[in-house]
Image: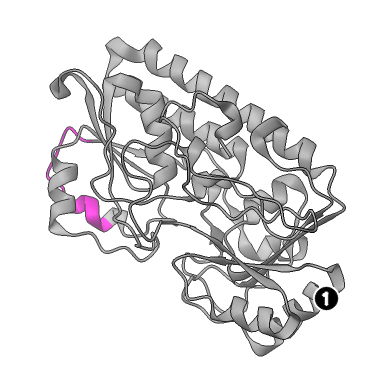
Amino acid sequence: MRGGIARAGTIAVAVCMAALLFAGAGCQRKDQGAAAEKLRVVATLFPLYDFAGNVGGDRAEVTLLLPPGVEAHSYEPKPRDVVRVTTADVFIFTGKFMEPWVEGFLKGVNQPKLSVIDASRGIVLVDVKGEEDHTHGKNEAGHGHGTVDPHIWLDFANARKMVDTIAEGFAAKDPPNREFYLKNAAVYNAKLDDLDRGYRETLATCQKKVIIHGGHFAFGYLARRYGLTYEAAYGGSPDAEPTARRLVELKNKLKQHGVDYVYYEELITPRVAEVLAKETGAKLLKHPSHALADDRSCGGKALGGLTEHDRAGDGSVIAPVNARDLDDRRLADPERLI
């Protein structure tokens, strides 16, 4: 089956790309050859870490900035982080709405030759309020990043643009290897195209396309791209709380659509999801969202091996994402990318 997605008659939970994950301060891609000959790259989040590693190949040494169990929006950089970036050639971040701390952080980095890549360049960010009618993700509890949804990599079209932006940044920093980086980007993007097709073909066979998420509005891009109905408990802030009215709405939606699973994120206390599950008899499903709670993505592992999709006893796609059977970082097998 294309993309490794289990075909099913109902969707109980989001079929999410594992690029949502990032973790592991000190995670490092270890390649052969002299480190001095490679681009030294620091990426803030796991999707960027993986994109950069595949574009840079054996001509880049890529490390991941955020430590395990840390929420990206509210991260507070440490002095050692400044030191790491000061010794780097390239720094990559998702954008000012995903990592609002980056602007202030870079002011403390004394590295005139540092190339800074904003991976969101050229991407139109979706306004959460503008998406509410489409995904029904009510925004009643405030925002961690204003009204903008910064989880741009969950749309494969955006992911491809991010890969190209990173490749262009590497090429500008290391002109002799320009063609190498651009070729690697094209190969990676071809695999993203395959994944995109796999999602569309598989989701087209599903009778129900409803995601009930007991957390903040994080999967709007995914829902928008594949025509899913996305019900989030609250808006952009992971630390927000939904209103009593919103809880009643979600409870009714679970019953209305016959959804048996409530989604929640690993790093966020699942109080909302637990209440909904208790009230409706639904089961809980955990997704390691912006960061893993441990160091499961360390050791040069790739996006491809970070997700497995399982099938519930009734044939529903439950798809809890985990890090079992991690692949080689090359993403050689497109069917392991999701």
For the view shown, which residue lies furthest in the front direction?
Answer: 313
Q: Is residue 235 above or below residue 56?
A: below
The residue pinned by badge 1 equals 255
Foreground: 265 or 190? 265
Colour mapping: one colour
- The residue depicted at 83 percent of the width and 49 percent of the height is 206
Residue 256's spot in the image, x, y percent?
A: 86, 73
Q: Quadrant of the N terminus?
A: top right
Q: Secondary structure at mark 1?
A: helix
Residue 12 placement, left or right of 167: right
- The residue depicted at 69 percent of the width and 83 percent of the height is 247
Magenta extent: 104-114
Tag 1: amino acid: Lys
Foreground: 198 or 310? 310
Foreground: 138 or 304? 304
Q: Quadrant of the C terminus?
A: top right
Q: Is residue 264 above or below residue 295?
A: below
- The residue depicted at 38 percent of the width and 56 percent of the height is 99
Q: Residues within 10 Å of mark 1 (few under 14, many from 20)?
A: few
Residue 297 placement, left or right of 304: left
Residue 141, quarter of the rendered image = bottom right
Reply yes or no: does residue 329 show up in magenta: no
